Image: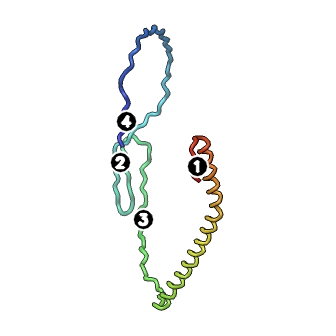
């Protein structure tokens, strides 16, 4: 769907505008103190089998200390096929027939409920349609064909 653009035309006025007086207000802004943040450009990490040593740039307040390194071993679980008792073909067909009978019964019950709902609501709907048509005909003067 295309969008409609607004007009960019400027309306001109013939009335003269009176000059406005300009009031200036001077405010003083005091700078707040800011903590200096120094960026560490590069951190070098040397890794050995026994310990990790971190080399920091000169001028940092952190102490150098070695950390113990442990080799983590994760065990992957072995997948085992589950033992399943399969039913025979005859039992499977009987199960399908039973489920179909249940489906048929529930569908019939649904249809009966829908019929009851229709019979309950239909007089109110017809009454409201008659009311709306009579009010419309009174308001606009058309004749009813009933």
Position of residue 33 measured from the top left corner of the image (x, y, whole percent): 49, 28
Disc 1 residue crowd, few under 14, some 14–19, many 20+, Cα 10 Å: few
Query: Can you identify the residue that label 1 sits on?
Result: 144
Do tag 3 and tag 1 residues touch (Cβ < 8 Å)? no
The secondary element bearing badge 2 is classed as loop
Do tag 2 and tag 1 residues touch (Cβ < 8 Å)? no
**Observer able to see residue 19:** yes
Residue 74 falls in image quadrant: bottom left
Query: Can you identify the residue that label 2 sits on?
Result: 43
Do tag 2 and tag 4 residues touch (Cβ < 8 Å)? no
Q: Earlier in the sequence, mark 3 or mark 4?
A: 4
Looking at the image, which residue is at 38% across and 16% down?
12
Q: Is residue 16 above or below residue 128?
A: above
Query: Can you identify the residue that label 4 sits on?
Result: 4
Position of residue 3 measured from the top left corner of the image (x, y, whole percent): 37, 38
**Which numbered marker is on residue 70?**
3
Q: Earlier in the sequence, mark 2 or mark 1?
A: 2
Position of residue 144 measured from the top left corner of the image (x, y, whole percent): 58, 49
């Amino acid at each position: 769907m295309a969008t409609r653009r607004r007009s960019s035309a400027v309306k001109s006025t013939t009335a003269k505008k009176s000059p406005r007086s300009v009031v200036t207000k001077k405010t003083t802004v005091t700078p707040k103190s800011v903590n200096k943040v120094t960026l560490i450009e590069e951190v070098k990490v040397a890794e050995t089998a026994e310990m990790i040593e971190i080399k920091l740039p000169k001028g940092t307040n952190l102490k150098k200390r070695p950390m113990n390194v442990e080799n983590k071993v994760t065990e992957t679980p072995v997948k085992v096929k589950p033992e399943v008792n399969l039913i025979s073909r005859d039992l499977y067909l009987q199960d399908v027939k039973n489920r179909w009978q249940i489906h048929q019964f529930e569908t019939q019950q649904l249809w009966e409920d829908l019929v009851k709902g229709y019979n309950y609501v239909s007089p109110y709907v017809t009454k409201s349609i008659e009311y709306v048509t009579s009010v419309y005909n009174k308001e606009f003067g058309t004749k009813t064909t009933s």
